[in-house]
Image (cartoon, grey):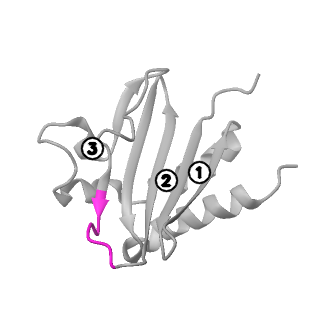
Amino acid sequence: MTPDPLVAVTVVRTGGIAGMRRSWSVEAVEAEDAERWVLLVDACPWDEHAADGDAGPPGDARRSGRDRSPAGAPGPSPADGHAARRVGRSLPPDRFSYDIRARQRRDEALVDRHVVLAESRLTGPWRTLADEVRQRAATPAG
């Protein structure tokens, strides 16, 4: 049985001319590997996007860019309209959007982060995180 990951990151790209959906995921179960992913995830400005106006109702814990739940408790569902920070909402035609979700186990809690970015906003640490996930997912294990 595989242990629960310490860090899991999923990047889903949607849109483009054909409206194709692609997804890439990584999971780190070893502390050494998890440390690298924690640095990449923490480098992203999750909290900046909470003030975007589509981050949930005032007082909602998700406004901080982090959803906390006890270990093993389900996080927000993708169908939850307030779970994602939507940045660059009106996408130009035939552009991509990137749905990025990161889950980290910290002490006895799970920290969920989720953001939806227009392609033009996928810069800096967001671009680095997405590219690293894509590259790692494409590399055969071994």
Q: Whole-Å distance between the Cαs marked 3 and 1? A: 27 Å
Residue 41 disc label: 2
Task: Tell me the residue at 49%/20% (across/down).
Answer: 72
Q: Which amino acid, mark 3?
A: Gly
| SS category of the residue bearing label 1 | helix
| Label located before the other in sequence (3 or 1) | 1
Q: Are dots 3 and 2 in contact, CB under 8 Å? A: no
Magenta segment, principal secondary structure?
loop
Q: Whole-Å distance between the Cαs marked 1 and 2? A: 6 Å
Can you tell which quarter of the image residue 88 is in?
bottom left
Task: Tell me the residue at 22%/50% (across/down).
Answer: 55
Q: Is residue 65 left or right of residue 11?
A: left
Residue 37 disc label: 1
Q: Is residue 128 left or right of residue 67?
A: right
Which quarter of the rendered picture does the N terminus lie within?
A: top right
Q: Nearer the viewer, residue 4 or 79?
A: 79
Q: How many marks?
A: 3
The residue mark sitting in front, 3 or 1, is: 3
Q: Is residue 66 left or right of residue 142?
A: left
Can you tell which quarter of the image residue 124 is in?
bottom left
Q: Note whether 48 is above or below 80 in the view shown.
A: below
Task: Tell me the residue at 43%/21% (across/down).
Answer: 73
Q: Note whether 25 is above or below 60 in the view shown.
A: below
**Region in magenta:** 86-92
Q: Which amino acid, mark 2?
A: Val
Q: Nearer the viewer, residue 17 or 23?
A: 17
Q: Note whether 13 is above or below 92 in the view shown.
A: above
| SS category of the residue bearing label 3 | loop
| SS category of the residue bearing label 2 | helix
Measured from the top left, where is residue 21 in percent x and y?
A: 54, 60
